[in-house]
Amino acid sequence: MKYIKRHFLRRMKELLEQFPIVCLLGPRQCGKTTFIKQELPGWKYFDLEKPAHAVQVEEDPEAVLARNKSKIVFDEAQQIPSLFPVLRSYVDELQDAEGSIVLLGSASPQLIQGVSESLAGRVGFIDMTPFLLDEVHDERGLWLRGGFPRAYMEEDRARRLSWYEAYTRTFIERDLQLYGIEVNSSQMRKLWAMLAHLHGGMLNASELGNSLGMSYHTVNRYIDIMEQTFLVRRLRPYFANIGKRLVKSPKIFMRDSGLLHYFLGISSEDDLATSPKRGSSWEGFTIEQIIGWAQQKFIGAEYFYWQTATKQEVDLLIKTGRNLIPIEIKTHTSPRKSDVKGLISCMQDLNLKKGYVVHPKDSCYSLGDGIEVLTLTELFELIG
């Protein structure tokens, strides 16, 4: 499979110069292992899902570290939680520990807990995504097939659907058990399918629970699991004291458009063009592309949506320090001012001078009053 250069490399190099340990988190099959093997070819690699590697590390981690000194990669590090306190002692004893260890993990609660408890202040984090637009430069293909490397590169529709079926089954029936998480497989799959149909809408755990025959506690627990494993995103509303009632519920999105389309039965360009979910699919895809790009540019940025009780809405607000960047997302080929009343209202309410409308058509123009209509690529160039 052809290797595609990932834009996480620059950030990883920065963190390797700053921290003794760098932790690369992301969903299963998003390309973490391929990325590390390609970009750190001289490092010693341990896959802790392989018994031969796991036994060495679990039985005597001090010996493994002493034998290899530094420049070590531990893949699926959450498999051996006892490794974390050993790593803490190891890097504390090194005089020059910068860039000694890289941990890869599928964002399991165990991995995050182990790092936070044992390695606080010693580790830098990167959240790795499936392929992004500024890596593959193929908007239509990436939107339809999603960014998981094997699915994106698979042109055959039946083979791609088989991959997604295997991915979902493996996650529910195997991965969650490896993480020590007990779920009802049938309930989890039903909820996953329901979230695909709710994609881009308000999250109401009680209503979902009633529809699926679950308690809202179970719904929230399952969504927490899917969020911690980078499969869904809860986008929080932005609050400001402006004298208007604001919506308080989060929105829910499936983070990969290919996985969303699998659950919605969308497998071709024609399916996508005629689907009633086309608009919400484009919205979620665009939000993920913008956030994935912005995380590399604006360290510590926060992401919200904006909506008043009277339905004045902006799809995405990026908060960087004291700055707010409002972005409206449209599938129209030529959005006009009458199409972005929510953006205009938000800019007035929050006293913002610039706003952006992102659409899939290859054209860029101004609507006046500080509002620019542009493509995703043009947005990256303009505010980067």
Image: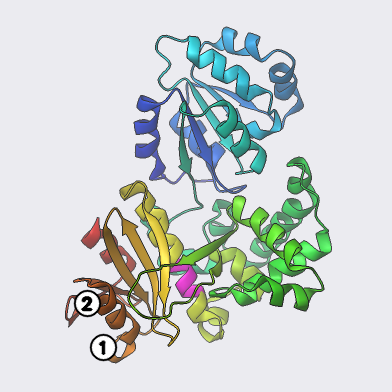
**Real-space Cα separation, disc 2 to disc 1, in angstroms:** 9 Å
Measuring 32% from the left and 50% from the top, which residue is drawn there?
A: 298
- Is residue 209 shown above or below 288? below
**The furthest residue to the bottom:** 338
- Is residue 68 shown above or below 346? above
Q: Which residues are magenta?
A: 281-286
Q: Which of the two residues, 17 or 32, is positioned nearer the viewer here? A: 17
What secondary structure is found at the residue carrying circle 2?
strand
- Position in image of residue 90 (x %, y %): 54, 13
- Residue 112 bears which disc, if any? none
Q: Is residue 175 left or right of residue 374?
A: right
- Residue 337 bears which disc, if any? 1
Residue type, numbered disc 1? Lys
Residue type, numbered disc 2? Ile
Q: Quadrant of the C terminus?
A: bottom left
- Position in image of residue 251 (x %, y %): 53, 70
Query: Residue 212 magenta-drawn?
Result: no
Measuring 34% from the left and 32% from the top, which residue is drawn there?
A: 14
**Main secondary structure of the magenta stretch:** helix
Dividing the picture into quadrants, the one containing residue 210 is: bottom right
Residue 148 visible from this viewpoint: yes
Dividing the picture into quadrants, the one containing residue 249 is: bottom right
Disc 2 target residue: 371
Measuring 54% from the left and 44% from the top, which residue is drawn there?
A: 31
Q: Which of the two residues, 77 or 256, is positioned nearer the viewer here? A: 77
Measuring 64% from the left and 62% from the top, which residue is drawn there?
A: 160
What secondary structure is found at the residue carrying circle 1?
helix
Query: Residue 285 magenta-drawn?
Result: yes
- Is residue 163 shown above or below 260? above
